[in-house]
Every structure is written in C-alpha cells, then in structure tokens.
Image (tube, rainbow, N blue to C red):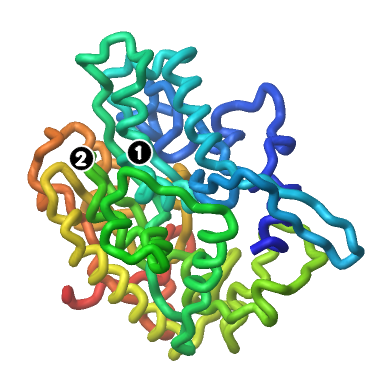
Amino acid sequence: DEPTCYNRTVTFGGTSAWLKDNQTAEQIGFKGLTSDNCTENPTFCDFTSVLVVYCDGASFSSNREDQVYYTDPSGKRTGMYFRGRRILDAVLDTLVEEHGLGDARDVLIGGDSAGGLAVFGQANYVQRRIQRHPKLPCPDRPPAVRFAPNSGFFLFHDNVQGKLVWQAQMQYLYTMSNWTMEDNGCLAQFVPQMQWLCLFPQNAYPFVEAPIFVLNSALDLYQTANFLAAEPITGFPNWESSEVSFFSGYNSSAAPGWANCSGGDALLKDCGASQVASMNSYMDSFEATIRSASAFNKAGNGAFIYGCYNHNAEMGNLGYRTYVVDNVTMRDALAAWWRSDGNAPAAGHQHVTRGRYAFPANVTDPSDTCVYWLIATPF
C-alpha cells in the first residue's frame, strides 16, 4: 500500500541512489547461481550476467500513468510512479539494441524473491519480447530462453489464525499499481475482478511456455514471516507509518508468539512445538501445491525444492553449493537441467524434499547449513 511503497522509495528497494560506482559483481549481488567464480559456479561463471535492480514494488509489473500520492504523519505529500513494466521494456530493448542480447544463443532468466515472482507472471511476455524483437540480428535464429525463478514461489496460504493477510495486501497492490500481465493464460481463468489471483505463482506457473526450473524452500523464511505469521494491519490500507526502512516488516511475524521464531535471522530453536507443527503443515501445502501443478511434470521443466529455513539461498554461495535434495546439490541439479534437452522428461529433474522439522530441534553440527533438519519418512 502507499505507506509501505513510500518507504521503499528511499531504500535500495525503490531507488538506484544506493548503488555505488565501481562495485564488483559480488558486491552488487552476483553470488550463487550468478557468481563469476568458477569454483563456486562452474556452469554459469563465464556467462554474461545482467542484474536488473528491483525498484517498482510490483515485480516489474506496475504500469500506471498518473502518480500515487502518500501523505506522511507530518503532512508532507509525496508522489510515486508505478512504471515497472516500462522499466522492464526499456531494459530488454537496451540489452538487445546496445549490448548484444540478440546475439546470444541461450538466455537464462532468473529472479530473486519478488524478482522470482515476476518470472512466473511475465515469463511469456519477456520471452516473446526478446525472440520477436524487431532489431534481432538474426530473426530466424532468436535466442533460446529458459527461466529459473528462485525464492519467488509465493504460496496462496492463510496465516496461523486462518486469515488471508498477504492476499489482501497483494490485491490492493494489484489495483494501486495497475499491475499488468500479458501473454499469460492465467488471466482467462478468472473473471476481471479476480484476475489479481494470477499474481500467485501457483496460478501462473501452469501457463509458462518456456522451460522453467523452480528453486525454492518449502519453508521459506520470508513466507513464514509475511504469510504464515503475519497479522492484518490495523486500518489497512488507510494507515500511517513514520518508519522508513526496507526491513520494517510492519505486520510480519506479528501473530502471537511468532516474533522470535520467524523473519530476519530467526532460528528454529526459538520456535515452540505448535509453531514447528504449523511450519511442517506449511511445507506439506507447499509441496502438494507445486507437485499438483501441470507444469511440474511438463517436459523440459524441473524443480529443486529444499527444506532449509531460508530465503534467497540460491543467491548465496553457501546454500547454492551445499543444499542437498535426493543426494544432489542445488548447484548440480540446476546445471543438469540446463545441460539437458529442452524437452527432457521432467521426472529426471525433480528434486523435492521429503523431510520435516523435529521438536525440539536436533542440533547436530553448528557448522551445518541446515542444522535443524531431520529426514522423515517420505510421504
């Protein structure tokens, strides 16, 4: 809503002013699957990489002509532009026309968190804009495009009290920002008043046409704080906040008893038995949802769904290198999918965790990247 989006305009989540000149690739976020270190990332280290900084608050999907105004508690009125779609178009055009994207043979497009969310909704649009660009040097041989969204499969799920908190916030953002999706068969599944449901990957995922490899935690730290343990904001969307912080959270982890168990640097050792049970149930829902999607078994697709309590592990060297499902690391699973034929059976590239958390936490090795994890009986 307006207060939240205003706060983002003065942080790295809404302005490029925080970017500095002459930063190294790693300093601006190129780690994990985008790292140029061939020891950490042997398959993709020598790719030409482009980081498109997130800045519109709506996953590069906002497309509003007029400004949206926010008045802070002091009475100061500030206008905000929601034009993420135009930014996306400008970036793609610039890359094709000035930086050789049209000369590429293969293109892998990812997205981290909200960027991952953008991939599900905009994949078909982005693929066509690249492959049908009027200034491609060889229109008869356009680049092959694949997608690998990470930590962006935001689940449609109620909070621990059965309230649809996140959904109400996203529905409001959809209208406020004039969220725009094209080339997305999801829209035809809903009447206009309900098309905001296509924001959720479980509804958009089945309609992604290009090969897609989903990377996500079944117990995503961000989702736990903002979906499962969130509380409705009093007065939403007509409320005020004087706090300016990208990490302010507002209503995240606000459900009774969840403050130390979810969000930020929360540790599972601080969670009680009922909370662990809720988390395991969330994992059940996540895995059942992605497995039931038609796209999950579509030839050319794949997935790596891990169980560690994390968010954006794919963009860090440690999780990318060490998280394991089916005795395969995240890094190797993605590499195997990338090397496969674009029509390879999905069954050969599906890695979905079968573990659940124990209570109390079983701490086996403080250096372990997922120390509270126990492998349970496969479901």
User: Where is mark 1, residue-wise?
Assistant: 125
Q: Position of residue 350 (x, y in %)?
A: 18, 54
Q: Disc 1 on helix, strand or loop?
A: helix
- The quadrant of the image that shows the N terminus is bottom right
Instruction: Judge left or right: residue 76 versus residue 233.
Output: right
The disc placed on residue 337 is: 2
Q: Amino acid at mark 1?
A: Tyr
- The quadrant of the image that shows the C terminus is bottom left
For marks 2 and 1, give the one nearer the viewer.
1
Which of marks 1 and 2 precedes in the sequence?
1
What's the residue at 69%, 48% (across, down)?
Answer: 67
Q: Position of residue 111 (x, y in %)?
A: 43, 44
Which of these two is toward me, 357 or 251? Answer: 251
In the picture as drawn, the residue positioned furthest to the top comes out as: 137
Instruction: Judge left or right: residue 236 versus residue 60.
Output: right
Against 209, residue 167 (above or below) is below
Q: How many marks?
A: 2
Label 2 environment density (alpha carbons within 10 Å; few <14, some 14–19, many ≥20): many
Q: Position of residue 235 (x, y in %)?
A: 69, 80
Residue 321 visible in the displayed image? no
Q: Disc 2 on helix, strand or loop?
A: helix
Instruction: Judge left or right: residue 9 versus residue 40.
Output: right
Q: Amino acid at mark 2?
A: Trp
Label 1 environment density (alpha carbons within 10 Å; few <14, some 14–19, many ≥20): some
What's the residue at 54%, 48% (across, down)?
Answer: 62
Q: Position of residue 28 (x, y in %)?
A: 59, 35
